[in-house]
Amino acid sequence: MNQDEKRIDWSEERWKDMLIYQRKFLWYEDTLDKLAIWLKLKPGMTVVDVGCGLGNLGYTYWLYYGKGGHYFGVDISSELIRDAGKAAGEWAKSGEASFIVGDAYKLPFPDDFADCTMCQTLLMHLEKPEFALAEMIRVTKPGGLVMCAEPDNLSSTLAKHYSSLPELDLEEELLCHKVALIGNQGRIKLGRGDESIGCKIPMMMSRLRLKEIDVRLNDRVYHLEPPYEGPVQRHLLESVKKQCSLDDEKEHEFFLEMGKEEFLAGGGDPEEFDRIRKIDDRIRPMHKQQIEQSEFFACGGSPFYIIKGRKHLTG
């Protein structure tokens, strides 16, 4: 399998849609204020956003660095770069925003170019995340900031969240955890990245000689309860439908097959995945019915790390 075959085409509708709905209401605004102080963002900075997608990360922090600043969004998808450039006209005021097609493993910038180089949910999808992080460091000025916002989705799948869905028995619960762990091992073997990358980045930064390494967690807690009032609740409800493909059997089967491929690649037993399908077949109609009847509720968090480091003054 060559490198191009391993990459997800994020301009495809299912993935592009995910780039939008998963990032809406991702942060509390007061959290962003505190993170901007912690990151020491200031007006006039030159910022490079690697794997920028539709430019969401640049937009998220524009208020803190954008006045007189210059944002460079880099992504391998020319379609996403085109759409991000169009959207930037709405938010990139009093500064400049440029979008460039480029590879995270070979960024189109000279050494010591940016005051800040950042990424969000990029490293989790890469076969060689440390190579991309080294490139981010290369294009950052000595003393400059490197920031990565990456999840630990594996821990989220292993956590016990509270919801209106019936609890699984202990054997089923353990099987779900087993499939998640083995599936992530298979994902790594297939070159699709690592769902648990977030907590590993501080050590990557240390190996690459960054200084002043520090970590924060996004404090967003996702809670959904009837009657789903307000924009956040309505958005979360739609997100649950999309993430579980409750209204699209074909899409649901696509993600099940992807999960099976990763589980088998990690050395999993096909019969155990068939048991997961049976659990899914039992729970899924209940899930859909509860949502349709406005009875579904849930509460839980997901570890999302914000990691920063400074490039050594000697490069």
Image (cartoon, helix red, strand yellow):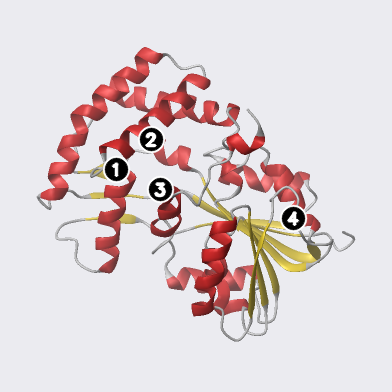
Residue receiving disc 3: 14
Residue beneath label 4, please? 107
Residue drawn at x 83%, y 64% is 112
Q: Amino acid at mark 3?
A: Arg
Distance CA(mark 1)–CA(mark 4): 35 Å
- Determine whether the residue tagged by mark 1 lies in a helix, strand or loop: loop
The amino acid at mark 4 is: Leu
Task: Locate residue 290, reporting x and y percent.
Answer: 14, 45
- Foreground of the two, 201 or 87: 87
Marks 2 & 1, CB-CB < 8 Å contact: yes
Q: Position of residue 148 (x, y in %)?
A: 62, 55
Q: Position of residue 129 (x, y in %)?
A: 67, 43
Q: First in sequence: mark 2 or mark 3?
A: 3
Q: CA distance from mark 4 to mark 2?
A: 31 Å
Q: Amino acid at mark 1?
A: Ser
Which mark, by number, is residue 285? none
Mark seen at residue 245: 1
